[in-house]
Image (cartoon, helix red, strand yellow):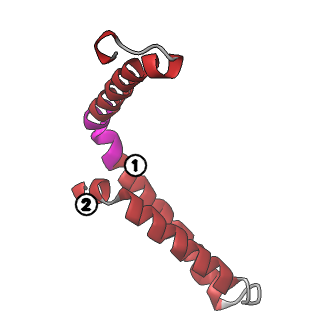
Amino acid sequence: MNFVLDHQLALRFACFVLGCVSTSAIDYAPAGSRAWKLADLLWVVLGAVTAVLAGFCTSDRSRLDRQIGIAYALTDAFDRNAAPFRLGKPMAGLR
């Protein structure tokens, strides 16, 4: 599971590219051919894999909640520090 969490962007990109290639390949196959049956089977398998991964992610909810909390705190702190510069008011020690 850590592999999936550590490589989310690469896995999403790989799945996107695989989907684009598969879609373009199946567009040239006639309806009812073996390619379409294989595509249907692939959709069922991918649905099962997605369900299993969703179960893992749901069980790891506390880690995700901590990551969201940390990201919110960092964004809030950055916003507070950047506010004087956005408003054109320099802080006291920077004159």
Disc 1 marks which amino acid?
Ala
Which one is in front, 63 or 69?
Answer: 69
Residue 3 got which mark? 2
Q: Is residue 33 above or below residue 63?
A: below
The image shows residue 1 at horizontal and vertical percentages of 25, 56
Q: Is residue 32 left or right of residue 68?
A: right
Residue in view at x 29 percent, y 40 percent: 59
Q: Is residue 87 left or right of residue 75?
A: right
- Bounds of the magenta segment: 56-65
Which one is in front, 93 or 68?
Answer: 93
Specify the farthest residue to the front: 95
SS state under label 2? helix
Indicate the quadrant containing the C terminus: top left, top right, bottom left or bottom right. Answer: top left
Name the residue that disc number 1 marks.
Answer: 54
The image shows residue 24 at horizontal and vertical percentages of 67, 81
Which one is in front, 46 or 32?
Answer: 46
